Amino acid sequence: MPRIGERGQVVVPKRLRQKYGLRPDTEVEFLEEGGRLVLARRDGYADPVGALVGLCTGRGPWRTTDEYLEETRGR
């Protein structure tokens, strides 16, 4: 069972680091959920919708569906 060390550090077990892709320098955050402390990645795992915020800015070369199909399939 992991314990919190003197400097407030805790070791995440290897099988969980591998399963959730937690590598050195992965940004994480601690959240409170239902009286529990939860560790979550900051790259969208905890909030998949939040990861999309700002993705569509209204700029860029937008195409119609017909233009896209013609580009990918040809005439």
Image (cartoon, rainbow, N blue to C red):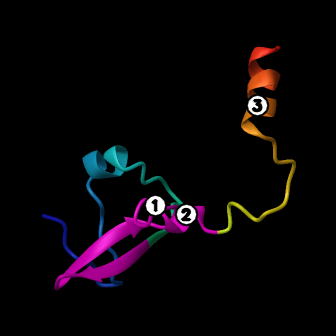
The reply to whether dot 1 and dot 2 touch (C-beta < 8 Å) is yes
Tell me, for residue 66, which label it has, or none.
Answer: 3
Q: Secondary structure at mark 1?
A: loop
Q: Residues within 10 Å of mark 3 (few under 14, many from 20)?
A: few
Give the extent of the magenta segment: 29-53
Closer to the N terminus: mark 3 or mark 2?
A: 2
Q: Give x and y (percent) for residue 65.
A: 72, 36
Relative to 54, 29 lies left or right: left
Query: Residue at 74% across / 25% down in the picture?
Result: 69
Q: Nearer the viewer, residue 63 or 20?
A: 63
What whole-number distance in Å separates the C-alpha atoms at marks 3 and 1?
Answer: 29 Å
Task: Indicate the amino acid at tag 3.
Answer: Asp
- Give the answer, above or below, for where 48 lies relative to 75: below
Instruction: Give percent across and percent down for residue 4.
Output: 24, 78
Depth check: 17 or 75 in front? 75
* Label annotation for residue 48: 1
Name the residue beneath numbered marker 2.
51
